[in-house]
Amino acid sequence: MDPIRIGVVGMGKIARDQHLPAIAGNGAFSLAATVSPHDPGMPGVPHHRSLEALLDEGPAVDAVALCTPPQVRYDLAALALKSGIHVFLEKPPGATLAEVAALSARADKVGATLFAGWHSRFAAGVAPARAWLAERKIESVSVIWREDVRVWHPGQAWIWEPGGLGVFDPGINALSIITHILPRPFFLKSATLVLPANRAAPIAADLEFRDTAGAPISMDLDWRQTGPQSWDIIVETDAGTLKLSHGGAVLTIPSGTQHSEDHEYPGLYGRFATLIRGGRSDVDTDPLRLVADAFLRGRREITDPFHD
Amino acid sequence: MDPIRIGVVGMGKIARDQHLPAIAGNGAFSLAATVSPHDPGMPGVPHHRSLEALLDEGPAVDAVALCTPPQVRYDLAALALKSGIHVFLEKPPGATLAEVAALSARADKVGATLFAGWHSRFAAGVAPARAWLAERKIESVSVIWREDVRVWHPGQAWIWEPGGLGVFDPGINALSIITHILPRPFFLKSATLVLPANRAAPIAADLEFRDTAGAPISMDLDWRQTGPQSWDIIVETDAGTLKLSHGGAVLTIPSGTQHSEDHEYPGLYGRFATLIRGGRSDVDTDPLRLVADAFLRGRREITDPFHD
């Protein structure tokens, strides 16, 4: 079977750190081109300054991975789908829910694959956590996602703009995990979003959700954590405590602890190839919907200005 | 066929002004009970202080109309659905998107009807506007929804709380119309939300949407309008201008103007009866999704405090 010729659009940190190695490591894909208005691209790989230029001048691509900020992703995705090109959307899949729904309808219409990737769902502990929880009664859930924004998002102005999500940019990773592993749907009861006086997006948030059986789910997001970082999910059940730590990589259940190698982006590209070969799409907007609900329903507090 | 025995929960302004007359005027329903912790109810109609009390003590009901503020609607709807009782949700159908999705899944599971009512869609001009626009090319849309909050929402503290939507409480009516009459999906490009310094919800908003063919849709919401009120939708097309005014009641197209009697709530109850008799649900969250997108992506500005 011929490899899927893929173009990577947006050559920022996530593309270089994750997408390019995952593509290089997956025989189902061949890297056909890169696109960025700023970045010079890579030696030996055709490079264009815009997706339009790539589509006009070639080389031909079967798929694109959109690694740009979410605010510009709709136009790129719509343009690719217009040519029947399969699209991988980095998380979050768009700046609004309605645009993702419109893309999803468009992909179905043209028969192309649209994949809204949630990389944290492919962390090593997530699939076994989901399997273990499927048979338990959930009593409570606590999510602690505290990191240092200066380390993980240095100088990324877009992340503080409307549509950039602020601390929900990492927080949506936690939501992508818990929407996947918890056996019941859940929804927001209350939220407080803390915004720096000079920024449009939150630097911290406290959220209270409840599942449809009444179990409380609390979430503590903070971008001001220095020193050790926390990406932990603790689920209390009728059969003891489950803990997912290190962003989902390490699973601890009463019978012991499992560590595995990181394979988030390899997992994503494996899934993308399977979807393309099967002629299917996978556009789950549940994590983004919960974030939108937090912005819709949350109370806002203003805190000290933030400077990079 | 026996009438559908209905309980009205939440006896505020909208219940008394609209729901009770519409139920009285529709032979498919009989008003079985009312529920309110504050209101004394109506002469000759059984009254309870809570939905729990109604369900425990009777009389039996087949359906309930939830006319409470949206922040408490989920628990009431979940309780009713648990007993297989059909549920009519006033707009907006909930305080969050995820809770409405959870209710929808629950209704499907128990085989009860869930109806998210959008009353403005039943305004007299809306159905003919939709039919006329189905064959046109849309060039631009302008929505002007300006009213005096002191006239329409006197002393309603909940509407200013998180989950209460502020000026989007009327604005969502316009969104419910344009999502229904425009032939293509559309999504938010930018928004500015204007909040009084002492309130958690916007008093005004400027929104720019775009449809999937690129047509611009602007929306001007303001709660500070005194004097004449504006609830107008103007659609420029390749065949001339369509104008829906008076909240959808009056339709003007190049061939002339149509006025009709108001029949929004009678239309809603007709639809609710049809859904119940047909064993179906109708839970369209598109208008609320667009509002959530505006809160998610919108830029906030603070303005003068608002006092009732």
Image (tube, coloured by chain):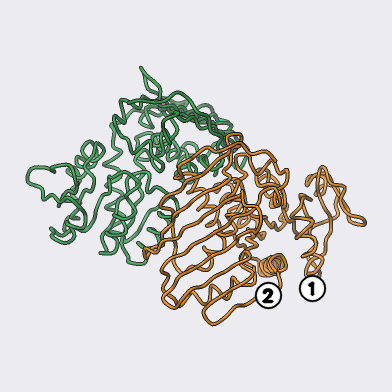
Chain colours: A orange, B green
Residue farthest to the front, as pictured = A227
Q: Residue at x 29, y 54 (%)?
A: B76
Q: Is residue B210 visible?
A: no
Q: Chain of mark 1?
A: A
Looking at the image, which residue sits at the far top?
B227
- The amino acid on which the numbered mark 1 sits, given as a three-letter code, is Met
- The residue that label 2 is drawn on is A260
Q: Secondary structure at mark 1?
A: loop
Circle number at residue A1: 1
Q: Mark 1 or mark 2, which is nearer the start of the sequence?
A: 1
State the count of labels.
Answer: 2
User: Which is nearer the eye, A258 or A211?
Assistant: A258
The local crowd at label 2, few if under 14, some if 14 to 19, many if 20 or more residues have their Cα within 10 Å, is few
B260 on left or right of A37: left
Q: Position of residue A110 (x, y in %)?
A: 65, 56
- Residue A103 screen position, x and y as percent: 61, 51
Residue depicted at x 50% and y 53%:
A290
* Pointers 2 and 1 within a single chain: yes
Residue B258 in the image, given as x and y percentages of width and height: 37, 28
Mark 1 burial class by Cα count in 10 Å: few <14, some 14-19, many 20+: few
Q: Residue furthest bottom?
A: A255
Report the side of B219 relative to B28 (left or right): right
Q: Residue at x 49, y 29 (%)?
A: B194
Q: Quadrant of residue B168?
A: top left
Residue for point 54% across, 29% down: B236
Can residue A159 be seen here?
Answer: yes
Q: Chain of mark 2?
A: A
B57 on left or right of A298: left
Residue B155 screen position, x and y as percent: 29, 31
In this rendering, the answer to whether B298 lies above or below A289 is above
